[in-house]
Image (spheres, rainbow, N blue to C red):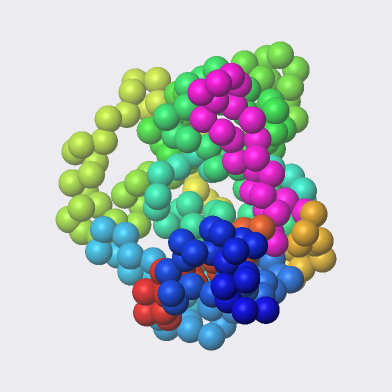
Amino acid sequence: MKKEKIISDLPWLAQYDPQVPHTLEYPEETVDALVRKSIKNHPQEIALIYFGYKMTYGELGKKIDQFAGALKNLGIKPGDKVALLMANCPQFVISFYGILSLGAIAVPVNPLSTESELLHIFRDSQVKMVVSLDLLAERLENVRDTLHQGGETHILVHSYYTSLNEYMKFPLKFLYLLTRKLTPGAKARLKVAKRFKELFASNISPLTEYPSQKMDVYKDLAVLIYTGGTTGRSKGVMLSHYGLVANGLQAISWVKMGKRD
């Protein structure tokens, strides 16, 4: 079919940049499987840069498998929901791909969410575990108390906390402590809270077999992400592995991303 005919039938193609193909082929693979390919093929390449700290793909892969192994040890199973209440940081990346490797579903949540918004999201999605910034400990534990005191003890069974400076280099790692604004309530909660770093204890075996590889990439969810709720209560948007892989490949094609980008 001639290019002119295609564009007349699909007029939006006329807006594509010249280097952008009209069609792409998408592999029938899970999101975490594609990441493991990069880890295997480029273990020494830089995967993450965070305030001067650099993590290679090899290092990232070990962290992902350790985290996934810890989730399995806690009883998290394929299909379970694990919430991420964090900003952009290495802990988010590690947790996200660890959740997916186990066949569980990642539920990214806006750190600015109020207690009532968190309560709705956690109830609606039936989140079993959450990894959160320590800054949000008071808010999150208040929500957990509300749920458990009401008999909903199957929600938020586990909560782990991390700090934005966990992967910062010196001197930022220590300067951050001077600017961090923990509320008195958060400080009190954190005294007895579990920490993200505990999930990487040497006695916890890393994941070596990936339940995600038995999933239906077309139907099984990778992510459940909630809308902003501007016209009502926020709603969970169900994103499959196949949809996210397609979206990623489309973005790569559109911006002509290379291996070094």
Residue at screen point 42% across, 80% down: 259
- Can residue 207 be seen from the camera position used here? no
Q: Residue at x 57, y 73 (%)?
A: 4
Residue drawn at (77%, 48%), measured in percent from left and top? 79
Asked if residue 34 lies left or right of residue 188, the reply is right
Residue 120 in the image, given as x and y percentages of width and height:
63, 22
Q: Quadrant of residue 80?
A: top right
**Residue 239 among those drawn in magenta:** yes
Tell me where the magenta segment starts and ends, as one range.
Answer: 220-242
Is 225 a magenta residue?
Answer: yes
Image quarter hosting the C terminus = bottom left
In the figure, 64 relative to 20: above or below?
Answer: above
Give the residue at x 62% y 79%.
Answer: 2
Q: Nearer the viewer, residue 122 or 155?
A: 122
Residue 249 in the image, given as x and y percentages of width and height? 56, 69
Q: Is residue 35 left or right of residue 172?
A: right
